[in-house]
Amino acid sequence: MRLTCPLCGERDRREFYYYGAEDYLHRPAEGAPLAEWDNYLHLRDNPAGVTKDLWYHEAGCSQWLLVTRNTVTHEVLGAEMVAGRAK
Amino acid sequence: MRYSGLKVITEGLFGNKGWTPAWRDPAPKAEYDVIIIGGGGHGLSTAYYLAKNHGITNVAVLEKGYLGGGNVGRNTTIVRANYFLPGNSEFYSHSMKLWEGLESELNYNVMHSQRGLINLFHSDGQRDAFVRRGNAMINQGDDAILLDRDGVREMLPYLDFDNTRFPIYGGLLHPRGGSARHDAVAWGYARGADQRGVDLIQNCEVTGIDIENGVVRGVQTTRGAMRAKKVGIVVAGRSSQVAAMAGMRLPIESHILQAFVTEGLKPVIHHVISFGMGHFYISQSDKGGLVFGGDLDFYASYAARGNLPMVEHVMEAGMTLMPMIGRAKVLRSWGGIMDMSPDGSPVIDKTHIDGLFIDCGWNYGGFKAVPASGWCMAHLMATGEPHEVARKFRLDRFATGHLLDEEGTGSQHNLH
């Protein structure tokens, strides 16, 4: 599997650290109910198909990437930088 | 039909014409007392113990493919009871006791082989941790023996004891640990459940779960609708998809774990050996193939096949531990879909829907749990109360903080 980093181009999977689902971008506000924190930290849609998840280009440009890919075929459909993306 | 050595001999003498199918192929009925979704190891053992222990025989097991075609047929067949956390320890201990009586219980040769499992350690700190683990195992009533370097060398002379990075200091031997024939476990439970009246329905995919006013009423399937008073979701590898049919979002992320087998060799590895520092473990099957594996590929996946970096890592770890295996040729590799929970422990619990139960989240440890998981899931579904040895496998423990983090690495999906 290779990921295409917006800054570095197509790179080997070993350059990247996998963090987890896109959910981690939606951190609850301070003082949010416990259920929201449980949802943020633990509960996942975990789709069999197209998903978005966070990868860190550890051995490259050190950018956090939001990668769109297919969990059934391992096809990588795109990647965008988390920094500066529209909320 | 009862299987026996005499039966094998007489059938052999008379052309093997007397064998009958091990289970029926029944048409689905319109209504059951209990429906189990998932005809893998855990689902089949649940059905078996519902019938055997609780007398509930109007049961269907619905399998979208064929029986035992999922993770129970795609694992590395290790059986062990070497956990130390209260909650895990008693559960796996119970499972080990069931394994030890399984062949006579099922009248089926599951080839359970208690050849001993050895966890290697490579530092003083790791030795201390293994002493603690061994004491916890002994306190639970199981067995553990601490081996020093010479003790390991006597049993496993072919290891590289003086490896620069991971010199071998010793090992924790779990004599009752070992392996079993994975398919036979599924088939044995299937046959036993069928004999007790359970309908095993294959090529039957559940497409919806019928719920009225918070109570489960039955399921929709590719072979028609079926009503049921109780429904159990036992579908490791597809837990999130089936639970979503009941509006649930699970604490599970599916990951891929690869395994490998070599060509058949003469007996050379007599135990199950785990080399934790290299994320590597190995045993030899009765057919002679070296069966080994490593860690997760570490990204969410349902592909049931992995990528090359982890293949390379596993081979390197194997060569580091026992350079002799470089001479063996790898015959094939495969991947299983692991239900990874945030703390690395499973779930056997009720859901927020009345009559709907779930057994999931087995991470990479589901095979050894097959007997006790079915035992406890059947107990929960029959009585409505969690079984004593599975009382901590709660679905809501991440929200309440009652974690079962055996590795002590934290409650986050990418840490186990």
Image: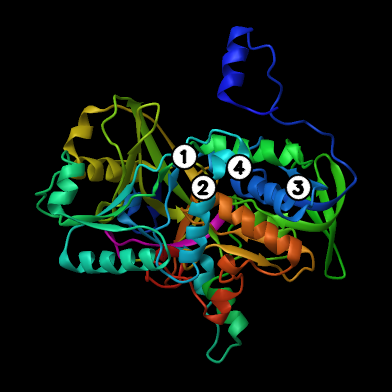
Residue topped by disc 1: B112
Q: Which of label 4 and label 1 is nearer to you?
A: 4
CA gap, disc 3 and disc 4: 31 Å
Give the mark nearest the N terminus, 2 or 4. 2
Examine the structure image and report whether residue B74 is included in the region drawn in magenta: no
The reply, left or right, for residue A20 in relation to residue B391 is: left
Where residue B385 appears, as percent x and y from the top left, is 70, 70
Give the mark nearest the N terminus, 3 or 4. 4
Residue stretch in magenta: A50-62
* Disc number placed over residue B206 in the picture, else none: 3
CA gap, disc 3 and disc 1: 33 Å
Q: Which of label 3 and label 4 is nearer to you?
A: 4
What residue is drawn where x is 50% and y is 72%? A24
Asked if labels 3 and 2 touch by Cβ distance under 8 angstroms, the answer is no
Residue topped by disc 4: B105
Instruction: Place residue B314 in its image quadrant.
Output: top left
What residue is drawn where x is 49% and y is 36%? B181
Q: Which of label 2 and label 3 is nearer to you?
A: 2
Give the secondary structure at mark 2: helix
Residue B234 shows up from this direction: yes
Give the mark nearest the N terminus, 2 or 3. 2
